[in-house]
Amino acid sequence: MLDRNWRCRNGEIDLICRDPSGATVFVEVKTRRGDAFGEPVEAVTPIKLHRMRLAAVEWLSQHPHPVAVVQFDVIGVLWGPDGPTFDHVERVV
């Protein structure tokens, strides 16, 4: 984990991680208590992804690590009667 709940003028990035291959992964986490309004990952709009990309550029400019690969993921958390279920969608952008 490199950062969490990182904020800038372009928005917020929930998690910023480095995966085992060395990629820097920017993660949006969406949580729902039910599926009446759709799955959590469906709530991530193209506008949100655009803001996430802008925020990632800003984060990268402030954290000059050598970065070969950048990845954007979404994690959906759906709380049901038996506890949470998770849906990890990799490389959404």
Image (spheres, rainbow, N blue to C red):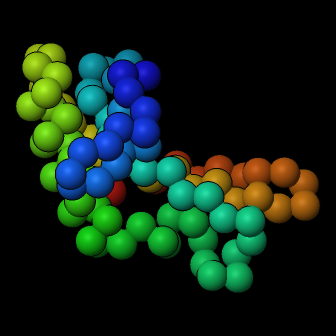
* Corner quadrant of residue 16: top left
Residue at position x 43%, y 39% in the image: 5
Mark count: 0
Which residue is drawn at the image coordinates 36% and 22% (left, top)?
A: 2
x%, y% of residue 21? 31, 21
Residue at 43%, 33% (x, y): give it.
4
User: Where in the figure is residue 15, as x and y percent of width and height?
Assistant: 42, 37
Q: Residue furthest front?
A: 9
Q: Position of residue 27 (x, y in %)?
A: 40, 44
The front one of 85 and 62 is 62
Q: In percent of the image, x 16 and y 52: which residue is there?
A: 54
Quick one: quadrant of the C terminus? bottom left
Q: Can you say which quadrant of the picture contains the N terminus?
A: top left
Whether residue 19 appears in this view of the structure is no
Picture layout, residue 91 above or below residue 44: above
Q: In this view, does 62 lie to the left or right of 37?
A: left
User: Where's residue 37, x and y in %?
Assistant: 63, 82
Q: Residue 58 appears in which quarter of the rendering?
A: top left
Q: In this view, does 38 lie to the left or right of 13?
A: right
Return the residue found at the far right: 81
Examine the rendered structure and indicate whether residue 73 appears above or below residue 60: below
Q: Which residue lies furthest to the bottom in this view?
A: 36
Q: Is residue 83 visible?
A: yes
